[in-house]
Image (cartoon, helix red, strand yellow):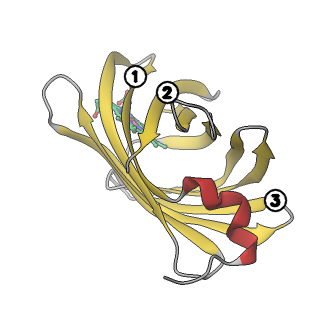
Amino acid sequence: MAELHPHCVPLAPLLGTWQGGGTGQYPTIDDFSYTEELTFGHVGKPFVSMIQRTRNAVTGEPLHSEAGYLRAVGDGQIELSLAQPSGVTEICLGTVRTTADGLAIELASEHVALTPTAKEVTSVRRELSIVGIGSSKGPRLVSELWMAAVGHGELLHHLRGELTLQA
Ligand code: HEM
């Protein structure tokens, strides 16, 4: 296995496959709950790949998925390039910070580009935190997302998920 690129060291706690679930909301839709699998990998270059799949927690039907790269550019600065099958693509900029028991990533969209038939999304904010490294329960990955979309100009909460690392 390749050695982790030095720029990616702060992102190392992400590596592996996480599973869990969460809940979602937006003013224009019914509240929902989902299950999620999220895998982070690396090849020794200064980025970490990410691929996510979700399902409806009640029916098991596939919901949202996304795939992209967290590019570690040094000094705790990161860039995200991400594609979604809904026709939404995001370029986000942000930071990664090591915390007492994990890490904290904050990202805000610099550009959102849409295919002609995608629903309108104008900006996105993402937070990813790992907590509980070294605790008896093991690490947990908490993700939250806000978006300005479908006529709402301000960032409103869409998702909160909580995942555990698979052995
Ligand atoms: C865990 C990941 C996600 C899940 C489980 C999820 C789930 C859902 C569900 C169930 C709906 C309502 C039904 C539908 O339109 O399909 C929805 C709507 C929507 N989602 Fe998400 N979503 C996720 C992530 C995202 C992301 C990352 C974005 C954009 C950055 C996004 C943008 C939207 C938009 C624009 C709508 C349409 C709202 C409307 O038509 O009023 N979603 N999402």
Q: Position of residue 127 (x, y in %)?
A: 64, 38
Q: Position of residue 109 (x, y in %)?
A: 65, 50
Amino acid type, label 2: Arg
Give the crowd class for mark 1: few <14, some 14-19, many >=20 residues within 10 Å: some
- Do labels 2 and 3 touch, CB within 8 Å? no
**Residues at marks 1 and 2, CA–CA distance in whole angstroms:** 6 Å
Q: Which residue is mark 1?
A: 23
**Residues at marks 3 and 1, CA–CA distance in whole angstroms:** 29 Å
Q: Secondary structure at mark 3?
A: loop
User: Nearest the camera: 24 or 52?
Assistant: 52
- Quadrant of ligand 1 in image: top left
Mark 3 or 1, which is nearer the eye? 3
Please tell me which residue is depicted at 61% across the width and 72% down the height of the picture: 47
Q: Earlier in the sequence, mark 2 or mark 3?
A: 3
Amino acid type, label 3: Gly
Q: Secondary structure at mark 2?
A: strand
Q: Is mark 1 within 8 Å of ligand 1?
A: no
Q: Position of residue 145 (x, y in %)?
A: 55, 34
Amino acid type, label 1: Thr
- Do labels 1 and 2 touch, CB within 8 Å? yes
User: Nearest the camera: 122 or 102?
Assistant: 102
Please tell me which residue is depicted at 62% across the width and 34% down the height of the picture: 132
Q: Which residue is mark 2?
A: 160
Q: Is mark 3 within 8 Å of ligand 1?
A: no
Q: Earlier in the sequence, mark 3 or mark 1?
A: 1
**Residues at marks 2 and 3, CA–CA distance in whole angstroms:** 24 Å
Q: Which residue is mark 3?
A: 76
Q: Is residue 117 left or right of residue 114?
A: left
Pick out the residue farthest to the right: 75
Please tell me which residue is depicted at 59% across the width and 82% down the height of the picture: 44
Give the crowd class for mark 2: few <14, some 14-19, many >=20 residues within 10 Å: some
